[in-house]
Image (spheres, grey):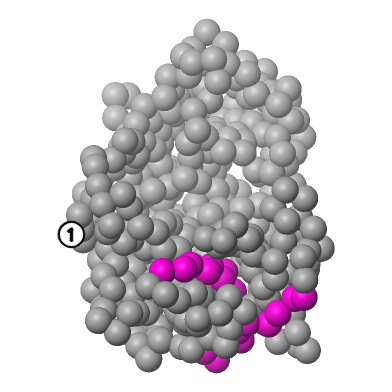
Amino acid sequence: IDQPGIDPSVFFDDDGKCYFCNTSGFQGRSAIMAFEIDPMTGKILGDKHIISFGMGGKSPEAPHIYKTRGYYYLMLAEGGTEFGHMETIFRSRQIFGPYTPCPRNPILSHKDHMGSQIQATGHADLMEDQNGNWWMVCLGVRQLGRLHLHNLGRETFLMPVKWGEDGWPIAGNNGTIEAEMQGPLPAEPLYKEKVSFVDDFTGDQLGYRWNFVRNPNRDRYSLQGGKLILSGGKEELSDFTPTFTGVRQQAFCQHTETEFDLLEVKEGGKAGLTAFYNQAYYYSLSLAQKDGKTVLLLESCIHGIHTVLVQVPYAGQSARLAVRSDMNVYDFMYWHDGKWESVGKLPTVGLCTEGTMMMTFTGTYMGVFAVDAKAAFERFAVEKLPE
């Protein structure tokens, strides 16, 4: 579709027409644009229209149009994706406006609800279920206590919606949400994601919870005989496409562990466990080859500055490593003489979005990696712990 900008959305009217809306630039401002398209070809049909500049919050974006109760409703995010995030709504009798703002805007925001662990709520969408009940999903973050920091990334929240007598939606608890809410779900969830799990790599492909950094070199990953084989090249975790795969950290307090054999390793090579935010921010514990000897290596990368924190001799080429995380530290450990021995504790704040040099949203990953080494991982387990 010949339209610059971000956050595209399509709306299908009840007369069969299809409309496209998104955030685009107009005279140095962010504006919500809308126009009719042919949904089969993307061809623009008619003029482009600026239908809103928002309520005055920065970065009006993520527009959605709905038709209900005799109006076209335009809902959008404002305030940026940080702690001033909010959702506003407008309505009009005509698809291209003029749109009148809701007198209760923002209809969803925690910017004045800073005592809540949930913050930065916005980028929302509305839906009606088969029973006529309305719902809203939105993005938000869970902060570390009241530090206004977060390391779990943006997450999706669900809340019930009621319609007021004035024809405007009321999201959640009059515009705020909780970690647990009451609502008339239409059925039991078909699938419940669990934080705690064990993967013994016996399948013929990795499960959907596993992610890579950008486009992986698939030749460096294989599943063989109940083991995940990583054949790492020279790329470090700080490089553009490391040999790494991981799962999102979904709870503040959890125990993550893995067992592996170091099959081959070059001088300076290594393989192990990492708490990975991005290529400039991560912690790792690995078996490494240094001066022809195997060592246990605890490393950090903060602001792109790589530091070897602990290097101790290690006997053998097999290891069981773990990291126990909470709101304060990542405690890296190894299994020794029938118990966990701590190698070092690193601050959780080092992997928080607010302290990084770049805007990212995915949060911390727990994963395994290899650099100039071939390693066979036979188990990866995550256990959620009490907060």
Residue at 46 percent across and 14 percent down: it is 202
Q: Main secondary structure of the magenta part?
A: strand
In the rendered structure, the answer to whether residue 349 lies left or right of residue 301 reads left
Residue 380 place in picture, x, y as percent: 43, 28
Bounds of the magenta segment: 47-68
In the rendered structure, the answer to whether residue 8 lies left or right of residue 297 reads right
Vertical side of 8 occupied by 248: above or below: above
In the rendered structure, the answer to whether residue 257 lies left or right of residue 170 reads right
Residue 228 place in picture, x, y as percent: 55, 20
Residue 172 place in picture, x, y as percent: 27, 70
Give the residue at mark 1: 182
Any magenta on residue 238?
A: no
| Total numbered labels placed on residues in the image | 1
Query: Residue 266 appears in which quarter of the rendering?
Result: top right
- Circle 1 crowding by C-alpha within 10 Å: few under 14, some 14–19, many from 20: few
Residue at 64 percent across and 64 percent down: it is 19
Given residues 82 and 270, the one toward you in this image is 82
